[in-house]
Image (tube, rainbow, N blue to C red):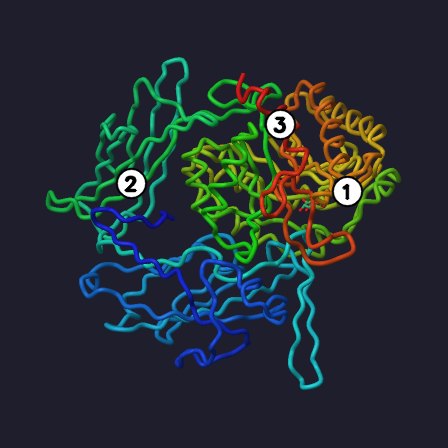
Amino acid sequence: MLYPISTDSRVVMDLNGVWKFMIDNEVDVNQPLPTGESMAVPASFNDQAVSAEIRQHCGYVWYEKEFTVAKALFNERLVLRFGSATHEAWVYVNGKFVVHHKGGFTPFEAEINEFLVSGANRLTIRVSNLLDHTTLPVGNYSEKKDENGKIIRKVDENFDFFNYAGLHRPVKIYSTPLNYIDDIVIVPNVDLAAKKADVQVSVKTGGHFDEVRVTILDEQGNTVAQATGTEINAAIENVHLWQPLNAYLYTAKVEGLKNGEVEDVYQEQFGARKVEVKNGKFLINGESFYFKGFGKHEDTFVHGRGLDEAYNVHDIKLMKTMGANSFRTSHYPYSEEMMRLCDQEGIVVIDETPAVGLFASFTFDLSILEKGGEIEDGTWTKLRTTEAHQQVIRELIDRDKNHACVVMWSIANEPASYSKGSYEYFAPLFALARELDPQKRPCTFVNIMLATPKVDKCTDLVDVIALNRYYGWYVQTGDLKTAEEKTRQELLEWQEMYPDKPIMYTEYGADTVAGFHSAFGEPFSEEYQEDYYRMNSKVFDEIPNFVGEQLWNFADFQTKYGIMRVQGNKKGIFTRAREPKMVVRYLSKRWNEIPNLG
Ligand code: GCB
């Protein structure tokens, strides 16, 4: 699916702004919403309204906006597009049903010409924030009736972030001609020795063109290659590579012609770079790449999980200042705007599906593993997420396939990969991702601490071993000496078992309350956070196949409440307001000294 842009043949209308809003189950979509409540879009609804009822609401909410389409556009194909609606949406235009989409982090769209009238049109959307054992992320759903017989719904998140919901990303209407470019797939095959890229471009069209023309332009707008057809191969000589923190983007200008005239034109940017996993190394353009960076969240004050481009720009500047080069889109696909920004900024991304919470019962009791034998925690019989999982893989790869910044897909975060049935669940999903990705990037899943080398069943499926480990925090709390031994022992064990697979940390961290200090370096203090990271760095540097450190988390973030969380998760190395904790100085020094490639 193409990102909506204005071109010589296309117009984009932005429906962002203040919408009408209400929480309820059913309304008459033929009538304007009976509400005086306002809600900004894009943003989560939860924190805007200063209402506990709205913030904690589980179930259905309604959004409404009036819009007018200029008459000049009525003969064009008009498409209504949502960057995302979390987690499920039913869309109506002028009271008529238009489209339904389930899955809160990927775009969807529908042609709306037949629903439009001249003058004011009414767009009504019902959004559900419910999650259960068939959805991704996974939620524990329950309902009961109150004294008036009203159904009270509840979702207990099976994951550690607040279940923000609503219209999180831009809502747009874009026009195309009736004959249009529907999709573009770009595969830049880089020959490093010959300094050349053979760029395959496949174009999918709607309607009919006499000819499709593809022109490859460099950053200065010079034509470097041109070909005609819907499946073309264009050679770029002296190719300028897209490198980590040193981006270079080409543009594929795709034109659809009829009777010699250009009817539709779309410009898709791409980077020429080669990603490989070889002999325990992660190679970008033939050189060993070391991941320095973060697990993040889309999480800011008031906006919740809604798109905030100022925070996106700011976060990337903070990362670069620290010498970081990468992050993982934990635990769901991030906005298209963020992915485009990473392409431009040379930030390397591990692109994760919203498959989080795939375990039946959560525990940090590592002793259950010592018992040995077959572990069966019931996850893979209890959850029914296969269909949703196939869908999120399809939609994520379809959306992000052309991004230079994406170097690896993460199929899931912390599933019960130690439990019986996990391999059978994941093998077909890895096969699907590998089949769908036109660029054939490496694939991984992020391994939970319980899934030690002895018991994990799914590591054969991955290209890179990605570990979330909390030695010195959830286990050996405050005892960094033992934590160091455990860290070393486990990393060496992985390396011995899989000598050809690179190993990286995709999470490690310690909750730290900004401003808490301790002369004894106790947990929760800024001193402990720094000691914890120093201990981990020391071990990482001893392991030859260790290819990266992405800590948890870039910033403090909101979660549901519970005795383990003080207004959210405090493992940020920045506060939620992006003020640095003490450890930022240490990590900046370390990361600025470690080369990105080499
Ligand atoms: C994890 C999860 C992450 C949590 C983190 C924590 O392993 O992947 O979502 O926030 O631990 O802080 O407990």
Q: Which mark is residue 267?
A: 2
- As drawn, the residue found furthest toward the left would be 259
- Tell me residue 208's x, y (percent): 21, 50
Q: Is residue 329 left or right of residue 480?
A: left
- As drawn, the residue found furthest toward the top would be 193
- Camera-nearest label, 1 or 3: 1
Residue at 44% across, 33% down: 345
Q: Is residue 230 left or right of residue 193?
A: left
What amino acid does circle 1 point to? Phe
Q: Which mark is residue 548?
A: 3
Q: Secondary structure at mark 3?
A: strand
- Ligand 1 occupies quarter: top right
Q: Secondary structure at mark 2?
A: strand
Characterize the local packing of mark 2: few (<14), some (14-19) or many (20 or more) Cα atoms within 10 angstroms.
many
Q: Which mark is residue 524?
A: 1
Residue at 66% across, 75% down: 152
- The numbered mark, 1 or 3, whose residue comes first in the sequence reads 1
Q: Secondary structure at mark 1?
A: loop
Structural distance between the alpha carbons of marks 1 and 2: 49 Å
Picture quarter with the C terminus? top right
- Are the residues tagged 1 and 3 within 8 Å (C-beta)? no
Q: Is residue 447 left or right of residue 430?
A: right
- Tell me residue 325's x, y (percent): 53, 30
